[in-house]
Amino acid sequence: MKRLLAGAIALSLPLAAAALDAPTFDAQRLSSDVKTLSSDAFEGRGPATAGETKTIEFVTAQMQAAGLQPGGDLKDGQRAWTQAVPLLRSQITGTPKLSLAHGGTTQALAQGEQIAVRAPMDGSKAVSIADAPLVFVGYGVKAPERKWDDFKGVDLKGKIAVALINDPDFETGKGDFGGKAMTYYGRWTYKYEEAARHGALGLLIVHETAPASYGWATVKNSNTNTMFDIVRDNPAATHPKLEGWIQRDLAVELFKRAGLDFDAQKKLAQTRAFKPVVLKDTLSADYAVDAQVITSHNIVGRIEGSKYPDETVVYSAHWDHLGVGAPDAKGDTIYNGAVDNATGTAALIEMGRAYAKGPKPERSVVFLAVTAEEKGLLGSEYYAANPLYPLGKTVAVINTDALDPNGPARNFTTSGSAKSDLLDQLIADAKATGLTYVSDPHPEAGHFFRSDHFPFAKRGVPALSYGSGNDLVNGGLAAGEAAGKDYTKNRYHQPADEWQADWTFAGMVHDLPILYKLGNDLANSRRWPDWAKDSEFRVTRDASAGERK
Ligand SMILES: [Zn+2]
């Protein structure tokens, strides 16, 4: 996922490697890695397919040849090259029966129309809910560090909560939740988690296009198909039984029947004075579920630190893509994922090669190729929930996803702009090579929460996702933006995201030494970068401060 994708013929920009005293990266190797990973033989790298087997073989062989050690699951005292990632695949079978009841009348709801309900994430084979009360919980936020609690101790056992999307200050643009920018409290994943922590039977999120940053079609398409999650020890701690969205129009009706005005309630929910309101309607739901566990893998290479082996710097990139799917206009069914994310995977392999060739770092460095990003950041979520190396002693996570195989550019970006010492250091290192930082142009869209660094950030580990720039050395912003638009329209998540012989990889050759320096300096220091003081992740990080002495 990225927004500043650029593309053009390379001209020269002073090489970052020289400016930073970092190793050089070989364009030919990057190109060949991307070409192999995105070839039709890899079948679009779908998790738990033959494409996964090929990907694991290739990435492992490259890491081994580069001189990395296996850093995955521990079996009989030996590390494997992979971490097994059990995934729950869950799908509603048939048409779900969904209805509201009020004052003796029943109103049927059509899946995908007024409501979009997800398959349950707890492995259950059926969902059967009869007349569960609905409770409006405002934005569904509990943020002690901001002295904000929408729940006010309400009992949600056996009830369906109804919440607004984004965070309480999105509409006013000013307040304690980053103004227009989205904090994690605004993200739908957070809202389900928080509702689960309150023991709710279900949560329905009210869809509104502006605060969601996408239309109902996106909600419908991404919630009514097959769902995936990591297999969790206690899924009920993360997922209410019923998770879904409702259209705004339906919410307005529900409020009206409870004698409430939707907009007035929303205004109230934007203040600390808000209290949960029990609505007059109840919800019934009945559907069968096909739930199965499949196993995919993260691929893990490692260099053990010479002085502080139990402290870890992580480089990450997702290896998976969409696999084989619906044909495009040319009849192509293989979603090759060359840019997304063979480029990041190639960068990870070549980063490992650079480290293995260089002086041994004092702290350990892990090269983590994660699976199932395209199914909701699941490989990174699984690693972060089941870390092979303790998160409290994980110094930083540097992620790359969909780098620009052309370039170079005069700027760069990150997915989201959450403030941290790590981002500050990256900006400084990049500046030394002539690159300027462009903060996320659409912080309200929540891109920070949609890339693989996020499962780490959520658990307090300083983490970021690097994105290639769009102010091209050759052609400037106009060329960069045109190339970005062209990619989004014609190749992003389509079978046409394929390797091209004319890609120079000059941008990646320029930029990767910056990411090398960022990680390598940390791997040879006693520094522990932290989140900014007002960050929602700092509290979590501070809780493990004892591990870092
Ligand atoms: Zn991606």
Image (spheres, rainbow, N blue to C red):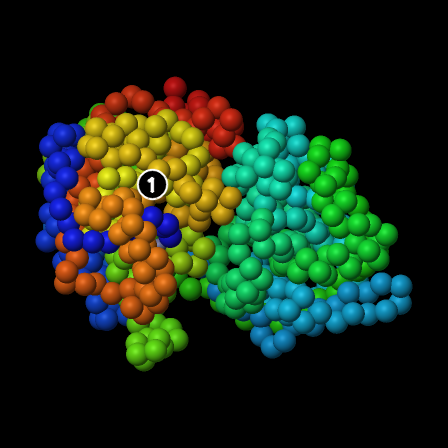
- Please tell me whether mark 1 sits on a helix, a strand or a loop: strand
The answer to which quarter of the image holds residue 466 is top left
Callout 1 crowding tier (Cα within 10 Å): few <14, some 14–19, many ≥20: many
**Viewer-proximal residue among 11 and 92:** 11
| Residue 245 place in picture, x, y as percent | 63, 58
Quadrant containing the C terminus is top left
Residue 225 as seen in the image, left or right of residue 152: left
User: In the image as oriented, which residue stretches furthest toward the right?
Assistant: 103
Q: Position of residue 534 (x, y in %)?
A: 51, 26
Q: Residue at x 48, y 24 (%)?
A: 533
Q: Residue at x 66, y 60 (%)?
A: 246
Is residue 225 toward the left or the right of residue 330 in the image? right
Q: Is residue 137 left or right of residue 358?
A: right
Position of 446 compared to 368: left or right?
A: right
Q: Please say whether residue 426 is visible from this viewpoint.
A: yes
Q: Nearer the viewer, residue 509 or 374?
A: 509
Depicted 157 relative to depicted 435: above or below: below
Residue 388 position in % (x across, y down): 35, 42
Q: Which residue is mark 1?
A: 413
Residue type beneath disc 1: Thr
- Residue depicted at 40% across the width and 58% down the height: 374
Q: Quadrant of ligand 1?
A: bottom left
